[in-house]
Each structure stands twice: as structure tokens, then as C-alpha cells.
């Protein structure tokens, strides 16, 4: 997510919300229908409008149809890096001297070209076995040291003429809130909420950063993204293993690396590669815009033409992802030891977005999940072997996955959770599914989805993400499809996708001498799905030792939590209190109790 915040609490809620609250459909099409006006500019930019006259604000955003699945080895992480760069400003925003600014960027790129040549030679030495690590600071040559010093001098000069965070400041001073962005395997999305009378400011700001972007501090930001990777993956108990498991599970599929990128690639991505990437994937005919709130549609169309109509259509369409993962023929299994409570994750290959089988798979996840679901009742309450247990179905743009995960309780072992999961699956196949249980799941789906549509922010996300995946009208058609799911459908998908040869299993055991992780008591009161999300965020927060950064995160939570649906407020409040407590730890007087 964008700087200065080192992580986005809201992005985690968004991810959880779209994976669970919007994973399946409402029980009545009339309960959750959205009237959307669609139009397209001559340059191919698509627009989706939802008018809500009762509001005083407008939530607006756009999605670039590109994510980590569109990358290749050598430039993994560039989609996420580019998300950061899109907040660096334009020819007008972010600098006091654009002429010198651009000169500095050109000089920096010349020096970086020479640095890349040296690292290329060091990689050759590494391949021959002459050195252990081409990026080891101890083996830097005098030439490399001198080039880095010259580069750093240019960085400092550029900072003198930069207007730091001006893009953010312009929005904030106009009363905007919630400006942020996010990158996934399939998309990069940007959004903000502005007062209704400041809508034209949004048009100017967003069109300007697409028409006249300046990717200043590119290499410094590349280092920031590298550090963000360390916080998200390398410094958490299971992060580095999760990445390895993900690669093992996906095999030949382009979902095999995460949006944060691989560390060696993050060291060598060049600004020229970023420029080429922008020209390919940020052309208007590869973008969709959504506007939700209090506005006049005719005025929006006129503003869209005036501001975004200036962007030129790319003559060459962005290349589509064509790699289809090879069928898995044998079970995959990974055993790891970490400083964590013993736990397990099992994944099954399923189906992509809008595949007919995604609907009964979603219902199957609903049968398993929640405090009244089968997993909680059996593994947590009856057997007492798990502190959390959950399942979910994710039908993404190019492929799908069904997940089961659980954390052990007391002296129980992951193998016990694994056996209990298989037992629950077999019950789905062998035993009748009570009609009232199936209806309860659909009723819950209806309630959750309807509440989600009341939030302009969540509606905006759904429109953009579903359109990127294939069809925004899924928002209005999924209800009837899920209502049609029968007991026989659920049993059929359970038999089709849950074979042992189609699964990957990750077992995490506690490392010898490691102490079990401790979390605030309030975490245990959340739903199993929210517990996992909150624990992951707390693990990241533990790595932050700067109270100023924590204050920034607290402000972000307070600013953005109002956009989350009511059912997610408890999770956000737990995170908010945790950050407050961390700040108190840093600011308490020595020798006193915090």
C-alpha cells in the first residue's frame, strides 16, 4: 500500500471482506440489486456510475487490469512497486522545479545503468561459485561504492526540490479521506472519498497522474518495497514458509509468486522497465473507473471526457495471461518449524471467477464456517483440538482455491486437525445435508451481502474487482445462481475437487525452544476468519519499533474504519487498541508501568 503507512489495516479488511462477505450471493435478487450506468470514452476507458443522492460525498476509484500474474521472472513485484510510484506526483504536483527534477531523474538512471552492469558481473561470479552473495555489502568494489555515493548525492538534491506527500496533502486539505491503493495477483486499484463539491478535483488529480506522471525517488521506493516485503513475509513466524508453500501449490501457474515480489528482482528492476510497464498496462483501454455517491451523471460524463479523454488509447492491447497451470497429479506436502502455535493449511485447486461450480463451492464454505458452522462446532467446541478453524473458496480471475486452515489448541497436533477436516468433508459426501442448515447458510449470505452493498466504498471495490475479473454484472446476477444451489450440487463439488491428488498440505510445528505466540484476549472473541486476519496484522505491527509510524497507522485506522461494514468493526477495534497499547509501551516513562 502507499506510503507513508508501512501497512494498510483497511486493505486487510478489504481482502477478508471480499473473500468471505462477498464470496457468495444474497438470497434474493431484489434485495441486492444495484442500478449501474455504464459508458465508455473513445479511448476505451470504461466507466461505472452509481448515484446515491442522499450522500454528501463521492467515493471514486479506478482499477488497472494488471497484477502479479501479469509479471515474469526478473520483474516480480513491479505491479506493487508501481502502486507506490503512482503517489509520487506529476509535472505539477510534488516538485518545486520540474526542469531540474527531470534532469536529476535522467542522471540517476545513467548511474543506475552502470550499477546494474556491475551487479551483472557479480552475479556471474556468484554462478561460478567465486562469491557467496552478489549483494553482500562487504564485496562492493570501489567503483560501485563511488557510483552509489554519486547516486545518493542526486537523491539528496532531488529531495530539496520535492514537495513531499503533496498528492496526499491536496486531497486532505480538500476534505478527502481514505485515499489508498492495493495490489493483488489480478489487479491494482486506487480509491478515495471526496466531498461532493470537490469531485472535479478528483478528475484533475487522477487524470494528471495518468497523463503526466513523474516516477521520482524510484530507486528509493524500490528499497521501501523491499523493506515492506521483509515486514510482511520475512519477519513473521510463518511468512517465509507461506511464500514457499504458495509457490509449491501453484507450480506452473503465474499465481506462484506473491504481489510483494521476489527479493532478487526487487534489487534490479529498472525505471525503464517501469516506464514500459506503465505504457503497457496503464493505458486508458486497460482501465475501469467507478464513481459511487452524490453526483450528476451528465456532469460526470462531461468531466470524464474533458479530463480523461486526453489520454491516448494504446495501439497494442495489454497481453492476456495465457499460462494455464498444469493439472496436479499427486499430493504436495510441506513440513516447517517456526516460532508459532502448531497449525495447518490445506489447499485444493478449484475454479476461476464465474465458473458454474464456484457457487456450490461457496455454499460448502458457508456450511463449514462461522461460529455456527461445522468446523467451529466440531474442532473447537466438541473435540477441543483447535483454537481456530475456517474454510473459504476463492475464485480469482485465472484460477480458484478452496482453503482449510486451523490452529491447534493445547497439546493437540496438526495431524488431528487434518483428520478432523477430512472427516467433515466425508460427512458432506455421505450424509444428508439438512435443508434448514442449507437455508441458514443462504440467509446469512443474504444478510452479509446486503449490508455490504450499503457501503459506497465496498460497492466501489466490488464493481472494480468484478469488472477486472470478467464482468461487473456478477454483482446483480450471483443471487439467483446461489439460490439454485442444491444439496446434490454441494455433494458433487465435494467429490470432484477434494481428492488427495488435488491438495497441498502445509504443517507448521513449533520450533524447539520457541514460546507460543500471545495475542490480546479480545482476538479470541472474533470470528475464526477475523481472528486469522487480525493475528496476521498484529504480527506485522510487532515488527514496527518507531512510535511515529505507529501514530501514523493509528490515524489511518481511525480515518478508514468508518468505511468498513459493521460486522468488521470489532476486528478493527481490536487492531486499534493494539496500536494504542504499543504506542503507550514506547512513550511510558522508564521505570513505570505502561
Image: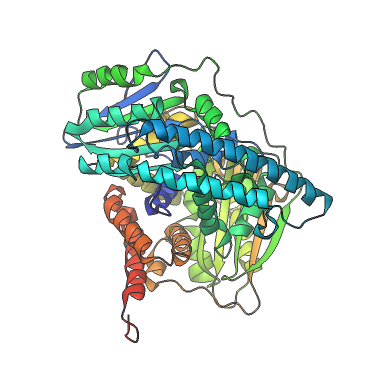
Q: Position of residue 406 (x, y in %)?
A: 55, 62
Q: Position of residue 501 (x, y in %)?
A: 73, 48
In this rendering, position of residue 357 left or right of residue 593 = right
Colour mapping used in the image: rainbow
Nearest the viewer among 510 and 431 is 510
Q: Quadrant of the C terminus?
A: bottom left
- On screen, 164 above or below 101? below
Q: Residue at x 27, y 18 (%)?
A: 301
Q: Quadrant of residue 215?
A: top left
Of all residues, the one furthest to the right in this rendering is 128
Q: Residue at x 40, y 28 (%)?
A: 210
Q: Is residue 140 visible?
A: yes
Q: Position of residue 364 (x, y in %)?
A: 52, 47
Q: Residue at x 58, y 49 (%)?
A: 148
- On screen, 208 above or below 27? above
- How many numbered circles does the render carry? 0
Nearest the viewer among 44 and 127 is 127
Q: Residue at x 62, y 55 (%)?
A: 346
Of all residues, the one furthest to the bottom in this rendering is 591
Q: Is residue 1 visible?
A: no
In this rendering, position of residue 521 left or right of residue 145 = left
Q: Position of residue 65 (x, y in %)?
A: 49, 30
Amino acid at each position: 500500500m502507499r506510503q507513508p503507512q508501512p501497512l494498510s489495516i483497511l486493505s486487510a479488511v478489504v481482502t477478508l471482506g471480499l473473500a468471505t462477505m462477498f464470496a457468495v450471493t444474497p438470497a434474493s435478487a431484489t434485495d441486492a440489486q444495484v442500478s449501474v450506468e455504464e459508458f465508455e470514452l473513445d479511448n476505451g476507458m470504461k466507466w461505472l456510475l452509481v448515484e446515491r443522492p442522499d450522500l454528501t460525498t463521492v467515493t471514486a476509484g479506478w482499477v488497472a487490469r494488471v497484477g502479479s500474474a501479469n509479471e515474469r521472472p526478473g520483474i516480480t513485484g513491479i505491479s506493487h512497486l508501481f502502486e507506490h510510484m503512482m503517489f509520487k506526483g506529476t509535472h505539477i504536483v510534488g516538485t518545486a522545479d520540474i526542469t531540474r527534477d527531470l534532469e536529476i531523474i535522467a542522471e540517476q538512471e545513467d548511474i543506475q545503468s552502470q550499477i546494474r552492469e556491475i551487479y551483472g558481473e557479480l552475479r556471474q561470479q556468484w554462478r561460478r561459485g567465486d562469491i557467496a552473495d552478489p549483494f553482500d555489502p562487504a564485496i562492493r568494489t570501489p567503483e560501485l561504492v563511488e557510483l552509489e555515493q554519486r547516486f545518493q548525492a542526486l537523491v539528496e538534491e532531488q529531495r530539496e526540490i520535492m514537495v513531499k506527500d503533496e498528492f496526499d496533502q491536496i486531497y486532505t486539505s480538500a476534505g478527502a479521506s481514505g485515499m489508498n491503493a492495493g495490489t493483488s495477483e489480478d489487479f491494482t486499484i486506487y480509491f478515495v472519498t471526496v466531498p461532493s463539491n470537490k469531485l472535479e478535483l478528483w478528475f484533475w488529480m487522477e487524470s494528471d497522474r495518468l497523463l503526466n506522471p513523474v516516477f521520482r525517488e524510484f530507486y528509493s521506493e524500490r528499497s521501501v518495497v523491499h523493506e515492506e516485503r521483509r515486514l510482511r513475509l520475512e519477519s513473521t513466524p510463518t511468512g517465509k514458509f507461506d511464500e514457499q508453500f504458495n509457490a509449491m501449490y501453484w507450480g506452473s501457474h503465474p499465481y506462484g509468486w506473491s504481489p510483494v515480489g521476489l527479493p532478487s528482482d526487487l534489487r534490479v528492476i529498472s525505471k525503464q522497465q517501469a516506464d514500459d510497464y506503465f505504457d503497457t498496462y496503464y493505458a486508458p483501454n486497460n482501465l475501469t473507473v467507478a464513481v459511487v455517491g452524490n453526483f450528476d451523471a451528465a456532469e460526470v460524463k462531461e468531466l470524464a471526457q474533458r479530463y480523461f479523454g486526453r489520454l491516448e488509447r494504446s495501439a497494442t492491447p495489454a497481453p492476456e495471461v495465457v499460462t494455464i497451470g498444469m493439472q496436479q497429479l499427486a499430493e504436495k506436502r510441506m513440513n516447517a518449524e517456526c516460532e508459532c502455535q502448531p497449525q495447518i493449511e490445506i489447499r485444493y485447486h478449484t475454479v476461476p471467477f464465474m465458473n458454474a461450480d464456484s457457487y456450490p463451492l461457496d455454499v460448502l464454505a458457508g456450511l463449514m464456517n462461522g461460529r455456527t458452522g461445522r468446523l467451529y462446532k466440531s474442532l473447537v467446541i466438541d473435540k477441543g483440538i483447535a483454537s481456530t478453524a475456517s474454510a473459504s473458496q476463492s475464485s480469482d480471475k485465472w484460477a480458484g482455491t478452496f482453503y482449510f486452515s486451523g490452529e491447534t489448541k493445547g497439546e493437540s497436533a496438526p495431524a488431528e486437525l487434518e483428520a478432523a477436516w477430512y472427516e467433515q468433508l466425508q460427512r458432506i459426501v455421505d450424509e444428508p445435508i439438512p435443508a434448514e442448515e442449507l437455508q441458514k447458510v443462504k440467509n446469512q449470505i443474504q444478510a452479509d451481502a446486503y449490508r455490504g452493498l450499503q457501503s459506497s466504498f465496498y460497492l466501489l471495490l466490488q464493481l472494480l474487482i468484478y469488472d477486472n475479473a470478467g464482468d461487473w454484472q456478477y454483482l446483480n446476477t450471483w443471487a439467483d445462481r446461489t439460490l439454485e444451489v442444491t444439496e446434490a450440487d454441494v455433494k458433487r463439488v465435494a467429490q470432484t475437487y477434494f481428492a488427495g491428488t488435488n491438495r497441498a498440505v502445509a504443517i507448521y510445528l513449533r520450533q524447539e525452544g520457541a514460546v507460543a505466540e500471545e495475542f490480546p484476549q479480545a482476538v479470541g472473541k472474533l470470528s475464526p476468519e477475523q481472528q486469522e486476519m487480525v493475528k496476521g496484522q498484529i504480527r506485522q505491527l510487532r515488527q514496527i519499533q518507531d512510535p511515529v509510524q505507529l501514530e501514523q497507522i493509528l490515524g489511518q485506522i481511525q480515518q478508514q474504519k468508518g468505511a468498513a461494514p459493521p460486522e468488521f468493526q470489532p476486528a478493527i477495534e481490536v487492531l486499534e487498541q493494539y496500536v494504542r497499547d504499543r504506542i503507550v509501551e514506547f512513550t511510558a516513562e522508564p521505570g513505570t508501568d505502561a
